[in-house]
Amino acid sequence: QVQLVESGGGLVQPGGSLRLSCAASGSIFSIYTMGWYRQAPGKQRELVATITSGGTTNYADSVKGRFAISRDNAKNTVYLQMNGLKPGDTAVYYCNSLLAGVAGRGNYWGQGTQVTVSS
């Protein structure tokens, strides 16, 4: 059984910062890509940022220069440092991972953490 557990969401004022964390646990052999997606009310889930096991990153245009994704392979953990937050960043943020476990290769999601940017 594989689990992704997110933490670090909350309420922040415009221009503020938050750091999200997501730890993968369970019977995991290898983690390929880890990433963050978000879903605002009434909108589709969208990619925020991804990072490969080798450290190659990819960002949505809307967050480039403000957000930074990183990972600690020894801890099976991915982070999202969010700076210069805007009200448009308000959404539920989901952790995602493509990994290989005892059940084979699969795509896993966390339960989501709410980020609200408001004055």
Image: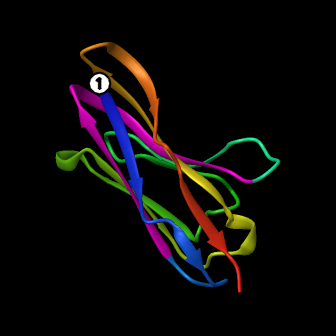
Residue 80, compared with residue 29, is above or below; it is: below
Give the image location of residue 63, x and y in percent.
Answer: 63, 63
Which residue position is annotated with label 1? 1
Residue at the image position 58 percent from the left and 69 percent from the top: 65
Residue at the image position 37 percent from the left and 57 percent from the top: 70
In front: 57, or 95?
95
Residue at the image position 31 percent from the left and 42 percent from the top: 54
**65 left or right, relative to 95:** right
Instruction: Indicate how the structure is coloured in the image.
Output: rainbow
- Amino acid type at circle 1 is Gln
The region drawn magenta spans 18-40
Residue 90, compared with residue 72, is above or below; it is: below
Residue at the image position 57 percent from the left and 83 percent from the top: 16
Residue 32, compared with residue 106, is above or below; it is: below
**54 left or right, relative to 33:** left
Magenta includes 28?
yes
Give the overall secondary structure of the magenta segment: strand
Farthest residue toward the right?
A: 42
In front: 114, or 15?
114
Looking at the rendering, in which quadrant would you find the N terminus? top left
In front: 65, or 77?
77
Displayed quadrant of residue 31: top left
